[in-house]
Image (cartoon, rainbow, N blue to C red):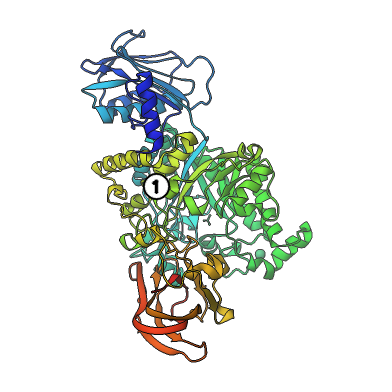
Amino acid sequence: MTTKHLYLLLIVALLGIGECFAQRNIITPVPWECEWGDKTLPLEKPLNLYFADKIENRESLIKELRDMGIAFKEVRRPARKNCINFGPGEGAWNSLEAYTLDITEEGITIDACGEAGYYYALQSLKQICAEYGVSGELPECHIYDSPRFDYRGVLIDISRHFRSVEFLKRQIDVMASLKMNRIHLHLTDAAGWRIEVESYPRLSSYAAWRTPHSWKEWWMGGRQFVDEGTEGAYGGYLTKAEAKELVAYAAERYITIIPEIEMPGHSDEVIAAYPELGCSHHPEHQGDLCIGKEVTFEMMQTILDEIIEIFPSEYIHIGGDEAGKSSWVECEDCQRRMREEGLANVDELQSYMIHRIEEYLNARGRQIIGWDEILEGGLAPNATVMSWRGEEGGRAAAAAKHSVVMSPHAYCYIDAPQDAPYSQPESIGGYLPLEKVYSYEPTPETMDRSVAQYIMGVQANLWAEYIVTDEHYEHMLWPRAIAIAEIGWSLPEHKDYALFRERAVRIVDDMIARGYTPFDLKNEIGNRPESLESIDHLAIGKAVEYLYPSFYYAPKYAAAGDATLTDGLRGTWTYADERWQGFLGRGGVDVIIDMGEVTHIESIAADFMQICGPGVFMPCLVEIWGSTDGKNYTLLTEIEHEVILDELPSFKSFGWKGSTEARYIRYKAHRSRYTGFLFVDEIVVK
Ligand code: ACM
Ligand code: ZN
């Protein structure tokens, strides 16, 4: 129990309140204000159900009551006893999503000023009923609740691997129960186009199908598409009717689906289907649309006409990320466009396209969202920015009075492993456990309030390169998206990881009981044990000389610079924790530690990791040498290691044990034939 809990208990004891907020740790996301009392509402008889006249979404509310198993009968007037009354929502409210929920001995009263508010009140009631049972007694409570941010979303990537409407609906059900309100549907990317477009049928009859199921195999093996119906074709797309059905299903649950149509980068599949949209007319491995040709705008605008007809969302995501931009330099059409428009560089060329597309969509009553690269070359006047490479783009856009959705990869990219990498399926990126996601703060105290007011919300992104099956997708999505729901909804002063985790475990257990396949949080292994405490050894603080200066550690993975390998800090499960030092290049690791004086040494060892997804490999050979004078070295050991591609993530120590006298220790780790990083955290000398 934390000091905060003890303090709360003391207040509760002094005030004589029956049970305090923290003692009934039931509702996720944590409500704005929630008080529990001693009395109870028995649920023996059907409740008298009354709706104030203005309430239109009665059918949906009745369905929710039925789903939670509450017995009721509708009445014409608000009853005083044994009732469930939905009030008229008079007075001032913070938000159309806000609600009050009161449970007393007499009954349940729910009030809200918007339809979503009534719906969200029932999501909270559902969680209370799940805890206390609908045939027993509900505890007295008063809840006032309102969201912290307007935008609480998840990106679902159905491009790399197609997912069915049924699968998406199942995720919508969970999201709605957590008061999440946006799905960013990543419909298009290099690996597949996933929405029917009548004007350009080859997008779905060709660019939605390939033969390898594995994305990696497809990516490495030529990135070919096949015609729909070809034997062994793998993929799929949403028909317009299916997409509309999905939009309606989500809307009934107060979730807006924001479609993403990527441009000008990540468009390999468009160019494969319609080569005239590429700069050179050669579809092979071209990812950027040609911005010089008018046909590009004709096609993208026609596609957007069809998209906005399906998706009523105010926002349309137009991508904007990771364009290679190199084909534009060579392309006559792009160069002509730059001359004619007075564009100084390729960043401005991309910005030209985004401006035109924004104008086109604004004229049709829609707004654009783009990844933070749309800042480069000049931001379109009304664009909303989704900040993914970090928070800097989001901050810059907000400072310029543009709305921003925060989704920085270090906290929100839930395609990374959430537990000890060896226990998890292959994935991209470093260790991102639930606790780290939960620790994310979109508008920290250090952010100027004039900037913070433009932060519209937060989003988890679940890219699917390595996620073939639905089960795996759910495993990655839940419970980490629950943390995003709570960050997006609850006040920062209510943040408490221990309490959140208890609730998350219950939600996960309930999901498993209902046939979902979330990561089973109660069996979490946790962080790398070695990283939890610093280690004491003879080389702490000793100088390290890096040999092969041209193959120095990579600046991005410098960790603590030259001090890293003798600072006593061991790495976590992720190479991106600024404890592991990353070496890229043919030289591998080659360092000399100067112990300062001749020292009696009995062991020398260093750990390496292998995580093939992001290209991190073990060395194939380690040599450890000792010297008293720094000139004449004796080989203490030579360790060979067979590096196996595609093996499960692993951590391994390469060391020597014995007895020697040395002042200088040379530790040399050779890279294998696989291109990628060597990571090492500490050279431990004893
Ligand atoms: C992104 O992850 N390229 C938005
Ligand atoms: Zn071009």
* Rendered view: 194 above or below 642: above
* Rendered view: 155 above or below 74: below
Residue at image position (38%, 86%) is: 636
Q: Is residue 538 left or right of residue 396?
A: left
Instruction: Give the position of the N terminus as an image quadrant.
Output: top left
Binning the other alpha carbons within 10 Å of mark 1 as few (below 14), some (14 to 19) or many (20 upward) gives many
Residue at image position (52%, 90%) is: 631
Answer whether residue 29 is visible to the viewer in this image.
Answer: no
Q: Position of residue 415 (x, y in %)?
A: 42, 55
Q: Position of residue 82 (x, y in %)?
A: 28, 12
Instruction: Give the position of the C terminus as an image quadrant.
Output: bottom left
- Of 619 and 289, nearer the camera is 619
Occupied quadrant, residue 510 = top left
Residue at image position (40%, 31%) is: 7
Answer whether residue 530 is visible to the viewer in this image.
Answer: yes
Q: Which residue is mark 1?
A: 480
* Rendered view: 600 above or below 410: below
* Rendered view: 31 above or below 627: above
Occupied quadrant, residue 532 = bottom left
- Of 159 and 530, nearer the camera is 530
Q: Mark 1: is the Cβ under 8 angstroms from ligand 1?
A: no
Q: Quadrant of ligand 2?
A: bottom right
Q: Position of residue 240 (x, y in %)?
A: 45, 44
Residue at image position (59%, 43%) is: 404
- Of 640 and 174, nearer the camera is 640
Helix, strand or loop status at disc 1: helix
Q: Position of residue 456 (x, y in %)?
A: 56, 38
The amino acid pointed to by label 1 is Arg
- Of 233 and 171, nearer the camera is 171
Query: How many numbered marks does the figure carry?
Result: 1
